Image (spheres, rainbow, N blue to C red):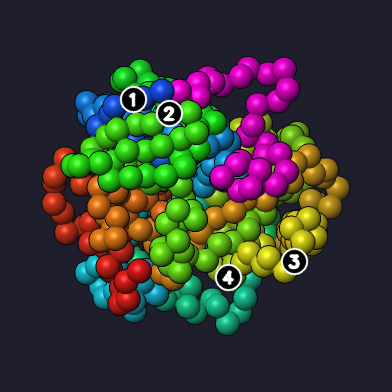
Amino acid sequence: MSADAVRVGRPVWLPSRGGRKPPAYPVLRGDLSADVVVVGGGFTGSAVAALFAEAGVRVCVLDAAAVGRGSTAASTALLLQEPDLGLLDLERRYGPAASRRIWQLSHDAARGLAATLRRLRIDCDLAARPSIYYTTSGPAVESLRAEHRHRCAVGFDGTWLTPGALRRRTGMAGRGAIETRGNAAFDPFKASVGLMAAAVAHGAHVFERSAVRRIERDGAGVRVHTANGQVVASQVIVATGYATPDFRPLAGRFRMHHTYVLATEPLDEAQRRELGLGNVLLWDTDRPYHYVRWTDDQRLLIGGEDRPVDPRRRRATQFRDATRQLRAHFEALLPALADIRTDYAWEGLFAMTPDSLPYIGPHRRYPRHLFALGYGGNGMTFGFMAARMLLEHWQGRASPDHALFSFTRAAGRA
């Protein structure tokens, strides 16, 4: 699938014309052998390639377009420890032990990704930021307070912000919020490109403009075909974010959504002071939720207005309506935003699962395959978690954690 199919508009992350260009990789031509073929060169595919190659695995990456230019470039790259689904909601679905372990793994993955980016010296504007999970709704306050009390009771600390404290931290009027330390933000395109470069430094082969046409079983392995070549490997890892048409039996597990993002002009100190928003990652209890953060060059990113894909509606019309509503939503909360210009607007495509958790690991229908699909709004954290878990699968290291994200975790199988 082309990059244009998974996003519309030009994200702020992509290099400007005439600017420094990222590495370009060749088209696959001819035959190649590897231990593992990674299908997808976005953030997850890059993380998988980097961890596998560093572990001594012979890796080949095939991307239909170019590294990091699809859904990854459409991300706002909030590196959150908290899954999309609150701890209380998750416990109602899976019970206390499993839910708390999922939360712990999410915390570990967010911190592990930040540590890996620093260890590999990837220049991606990584910055530690607290997150503020807030509500403007009176009826939602008690639910949010109950969530905060429960998190603290089981060891996931956070600070409760009163309406006054929320206004001081964000410049916004709200009913209350949970502030959590240990989160971060970065440039998702630079991070993806940097991770892929690290994989290449450890011997990985990367091919762009090399869409996979079919995957065949080949004895004890797989044969992955593109238009101009093929790769024979022991296993294939599908890191495309959602079930592509090649895996139609899995499609029912995902609901595709559009998400929308605006980036303002760079703001000077006086404009930032008038706006009142500190250096935090901000997201709300609305469903779908809205989110805000600053970029390294002092642009304000505002996102949300997620909508299920509706083939009956023109995509351009949805884009215009959603970005207009997104702007209006935040101007009501941050009135000074009305005087600030929007420089960039874009839309991305992502997959949601029924429980907002990804599917990571094997599927009974597809021998010699491993999958990393359906990250929801927490793609950076879950993408890195997937890379870690898939390496464990490859190395034969069994873990009870794998069952938490397996295709068989809920009733009903594709």
Q: CA distance from mark 1 to mark 3?
A: 43 Å
Per the rendering, the mark at residue 287 is 4
User: Which quadrant would residue 295 be assigned to in this image?
Assistant: top right
Q: Earlier in the sequence, mark 2 or mark 1?
A: 1
Q: Earlier in the sequence, mark 2 or mark 4?
A: 2
Q: Position of residue 229 (x, y in %)?
A: 43, 28
Q: CA distance from mark 2 to mark 3?
A: 38 Å
For disc 2, the marked residue is: 229
| Residue 292 in sight from this viewpoint | no
User: Which quadrant would residue 55 be assigned to in this image?
Assistant: top left
For disc 3, the marked residue is: 313
SS of the residue under disc 3: loop
Q: CA distance from mark 1 to mark 4?
A: 46 Å
In the figure, 92 relative to 47: above or below?
below
Q: CA distance from mark 2 to mark 1?
A: 8 Å
For disc 1, the marked residue is: 32
- Identify the residue at image location x=29%, y=33%: 232
Tag 3 and tag 4, C-beta contact below 8 Å = no
Dot 2 amino acid type: Gly
In the figure, 316 relative to 38: above or below?
below
Tell me the quadrant of the picture where the N terminus can be found.
top right
Dot 3 amino acid type: Arg
Tag 1 and tag 3, C-beta contact below 8 Å = no
Tag 2 and tag 1, C-beta contact below 8 Å = yes
| Residue 151 is one of the magenta-drawn residues | no
Q: Is residue 271 left or right of residue 310?
A: right
- Identify the residue at image location x=80%, y=51%: 336
Q: Earlier in the sequence, mark 1 or mark 3?
A: 1
Q: How many marks?
A: 4
**Of residues 216 and 204, which is closer to you in this image?**
216
- Which of discs 2 and 4 lies nearer the camera? The answer is 2
What residue span does the magenta drawing correspond to?
1-29
